[in-house]
């Protein structure tokens, strides 16, 4: 014999509601939902009546909860979760540790030091990165430096000593007489026939030289 399957038999399976199951105590079925046929059970449509978070927890209308994707509180409404969107305070630009556990990010640690040329310094600490620089770590985490203004040396061959900022004239003021360096303040005989003298105060100018007539290295009178 041939057995026929009726459409009514296929509709007997209950439709499941996802993602959460509901307790009959909280949501009692209406009498109209239970048909005369005891094998057929139709679950209510709970859209607009509850909210479900990312973990499957169910919340009633008016309840506050924290969805898995947000740290800001939400309220369950007929239109779905309505979440707070607060205007969070700005994070301090020197903040070195930010926590995101709450609704708004929160600065837990502010930078309290200065960085200069690869080194760190405490607030208000003074230091000399070079012989010519004096620096201080300011409260705003910035380094303020003053560079020494050196006077122009009064010689053509100044030298730099270790741990000194400005060059010094170890042999005193001088100038060039041709390619020869002569001391300032006196007349210098650079050869048998030439006498030179530095300009007073103008060491960068070549020396004034007086050349006399000579014969075999002897000055002619």
Image (cartoon, rainbow, N blue to C red):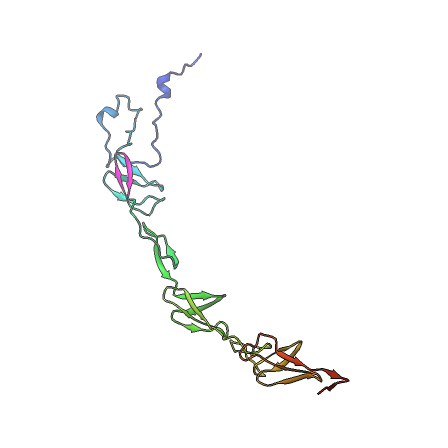
What segment carries the magenta color? 75-83
Q: Where is residue 13 in the image (x, y as percent from the top left)?
A: 35, 25
Q: Where is residue 150 in the image (x, y as percent from the top left)?
A: 49, 74
Which is nearer the eye, 133 or 154?
Answer: 154
Question: Relative to residue 135, is residue 38 drawn left or right?
Answer: left
Magenta: main secondary structure: strand
Could you tell me which quadrant the N terminus lies in?
A: top left
Point 27% across, 32% down: residue = 48
Residue 51 is one of the magenta-drawn residues:
no
Point 70% across, 83% down: residue = 193
Point 33% across, 48% down: residue = 71
Q: In which quarter of the image is residue 58?
A: top left
Question: Relative to residue 103, is residue 162 drawn left or right?
Answer: right
Q: In which quarter of the image is residue 17?
A: top left
Residue 82 is one of the magenta-drawn residues:
yes
Question: Relative to residue 120, is residue 67 drawn left or right?
Answer: left
């Amino acid at each position: 014999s041939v057995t026929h399957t009726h459409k009514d038999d296929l509709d007997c399976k209950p439709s499941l509601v996802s993602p959460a199951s509901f307790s009959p105590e909280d949501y009692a079925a209406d009498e109209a939902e239970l048909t005369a046929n005891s094998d057929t059970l139709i679950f209510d449509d709970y859209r607009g009546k509850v909210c479900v978070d990312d973990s499957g927890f169910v919340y009633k209308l008016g309840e506050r909860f924290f969805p898995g994707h947000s740290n800001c509180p939400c309220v369950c409404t007929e239109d779905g979760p309505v979440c707070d969107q607060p205007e969070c305070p700005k994070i301090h630009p020197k903040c070195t540790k930010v926590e995101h556990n709450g609704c708004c990010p929160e600065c837990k640690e502010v930078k309290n030091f200065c960085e200069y040329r690869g080194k760190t310094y405490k607030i208000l600490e003074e230091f000399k990165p070079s012989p010519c620089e004096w620096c201080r770590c300011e409260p705003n985490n910035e380094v303020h430096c003053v560079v020494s203004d050196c006077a122009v040396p009064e010689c053509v061959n100044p030298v730099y000593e270790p741990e000194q900022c400005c060059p010094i004239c170890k042999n005193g003021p001088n100038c060039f007489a041709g390619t020869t360096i002569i001391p300032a303040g006196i007349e210098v005989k650079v050869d048998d026939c030439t006498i030179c003298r530095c300009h007073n105060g103008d060491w960068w100018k070549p020396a004034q030289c007086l050349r006399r007539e000579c014969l075999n290295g002897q000055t002619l009178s």
